[in-house]
Image: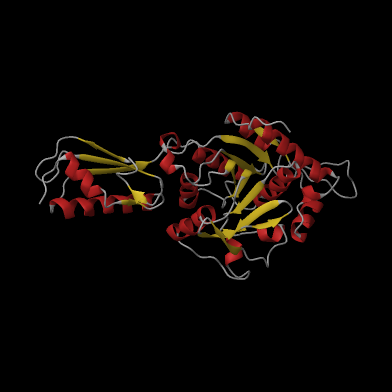
Amino acid sequence: MSSWTKDAILKALQGVVEPELGKDIVALELVELSGEPGEHGQGLTVQVKSSNPALHARKRMQEAIHFALERAFGQPVECKVDVISLKTEDRTLETRKVLPGIQHIIAVASGKGGVGKSTVCSNLAVALAQLGYKVGLVDADIHGPSVPTMFDVVKARPQPVEVEGKTKIEPVEQYGVKVLSIGFFADQDQAIVWRGPMASRALGQMFTDANWGDLDYMLIDLPPGTGDIHLSLIQQVPLSGAVIVSTPQEVALSDARKGVGMFRLEDLKVPVLGMIENMAYFVPEDMPDKRYHIFGRDGVKRLADSLDAPFLGELPLLQTIREAGDAGRPAVLQTSGDAAAAFRAVVANLLTELGKDV
């Protein structure tokens, strides 16, 4: 049985692998020891940084560390084990290998479902492609993957491709955008019922096992709300920032506020690039000069101001946007009209926040 020296402790912990990064926690320099251990490790604190801040992931890491120490030093082990989140600014080159060829990765989120997040995300992606950028779109909304419908690729199936001796998934390309959706890997009528860890692993593979190549922008259509899946993705992928979509309705705004709060958590610190007010007003086809603020007026703008977040613009509630989505041709593909102009204006404001010229 080994004695509680620093070298012996670190040697024992070399058997603990960081699951998201695929290497042991000692090699990744994620371990910090403090205190003077007694006969059973009492007085010692083992602090480990985890790339996955979700509670279930941190508990599994704690269990793995206790098991490794008990195997090396015998039972009982009475040291303290703290598993904390690996902050973005603490990541080494070893932990930043995901998607190295992508310049900007932007999460598109909403506090609640039904606010048009996927419609907005799809149109933003196509609008960026229209400007000549190389664009990818990941449909990470496992509860309701609608991007295949909006891009008219419901029957498409990504094919395997060999890249540098490894088999990768080739994204489907449509309207100048590379697309991967969880919907490609399930029957259209099949409900996707996954627990958090399984969903996180499956979504992670759409980033690590796909042949994205070099892109200027990748947009991620997140599931609505906040939870383990969001935290896992945020930690796995080096986000440039997040965009929050909401209607001006008060019940949606309260959830949008929580969404902003999630990205600004101390352990995450993801910049909020801006907020978008969707369904800001309704314009009847037979009365194009009329505007009806069905869900309230300027709610998202006021919320953005109160949270010190940029306001990227408002999008109207138009029949043409709904029809375009159902037909699999995002509204921004229209050469003229209020819908296309509104989406392009939002993209222009987003690029300004990113320091880009339109």
Colouring rule applied to residues: secondary structure
Relative depth, front residue between 173 and 40: 173
Q: Can you give x and y, in whole percent of width and height, for residue 64 in the image? A: 27, 53
Tell me, yes or no, if residue 297 can be seen here: no
Q: Look at the image and tell me in which quarter the C terminus lies.
A: top right
The total of numbered circles placed on residues is: 0
Left or right: where 91 falls relative to 186: left
Tell me, yes or no, if residue 194 can be seen here: yes
Residue 174: image quadrant is bottom right
- Identify whether 190 is placed above or below 167: below
Q: Can you give x and y, in whole percent of width and height, for residue 324 in the image? A: 78, 55
Residue at x-position 26% and y-position 52% = 15
User: Hey, which residue is sitting farthest front in the picture?
Assistant: 165
Residue at x-position 14% and y-position 39% = 37
Relative depth, front residue between 16 and 223: 16
User: Hey, which residue is sitting farthest right in the picture?
Assistant: 286
Q: Can you give x and y, in whole percent of width and height, for residue 153 in the image? A: 70, 62
Q: Can you give x and y, in whole percent of width and height, for residue 280 in the image? A: 73, 42
Left or right: where 87 falls relative to 175: left
Relative depth, front residue between 210 and 194: 210
